Amino acid sequence: MIVSFNYSVIIGRAFGAIKEQVLYYGINHLGVMPSKRGLSHDEKREKMIEFFYEKKDFYTLKELERLCHKEKGIPSMTVKDVLMSLVFDGLVDSDKIGTSVYFWAFPSKAGQNRRKKIDELQTEVSRLESRYRELESALSKARKSKEDTTERQQAVCSLKSNQLILENLKADLINLQHYHPSRLEELKFQSDSAIDSANRWTDNVFQIISWIKNKFGLDESVLRKQFRIPENFDYIDS
């Protein structure tokens, strides 16, 4: 039977066991405490600013890598990144003098930055206060416009009166449309058509009476009476 071993797992576990033993021996027998956690990025920035404010001098990058590590505990490998972040935020100044680039930061510069920020905030506050007053004024006017004042009551009455007048005018317009020339022309055409139709039926009645009278030798007055035809029954003049 062939047994395979995962050597990376075995070695990892062995190192873990050795580390636990070292920590146990150091704490319990030598009184050595584990090293503290490293500084965060923000803490490194604060300590570097403290260094500049305390020294009030000019330094190259190499000098800062050595001195910040020695006096503030900032790892040398991280000094450049921390320094560049402070330069980017305007907290540290830099300039090239000859062939070297120097960095510095004075407490007076920090005071100027704070005053500048305060001025910017005060300007923004003033702008917002002015805008707030404008909105308050607009809101007050809007509320007043909805108050039940005498002027508003008169305006409402006038509006209702005008609406009534408008409705009456619409009714008058509908009535006048009945007498519009085009409407009158339409009515005349309908009237003429009705007269023509009535006269055709009248002519048919006269023809029937004439045929019966001649066929059966009857008197016309008898026929009119028999069929209840009025004496004034005749054509209609158009």
Image: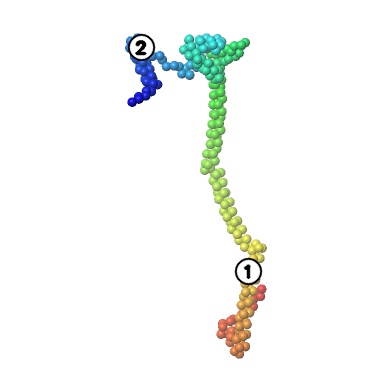
Q: Which residue is mark 2?
A: 26
Q: Residue at x 55, y 12 (%)?
A: 61
Residue 124 visible, this angle: yes
* C-alpha gap between disc 2 and disc 1: 124 Å
> Residue 235 in the image: x percent, y percent?
64, 78
Query: In this orientation, which residue lies closer to the viewer: 80 or 93?
Result: 80
Q: Quadrant of the C terminus?
A: bottom right
Tag 2 secondary structure: helix
| Earlier residue among tags 2 and 1 | 2
Horizontal and vertical percent for residue 35? 40, 14
Residue type at mark 2?
Answer: Gly
Q: Secondary structure at mark 1?
A: helix
Quarter of image, res 229: bottom right
Going 58% across and 87% down the picture, which residue do you hit? 222
- Residue 123 versus residue 44 in the image, above or below: below
Q: Nearer the viewer, residue 202 or 14?
A: 14
The answer to which of 105 and 140 lies nearer the viewer is 105
Q: Which numbered dot is residue 190?
A: 1
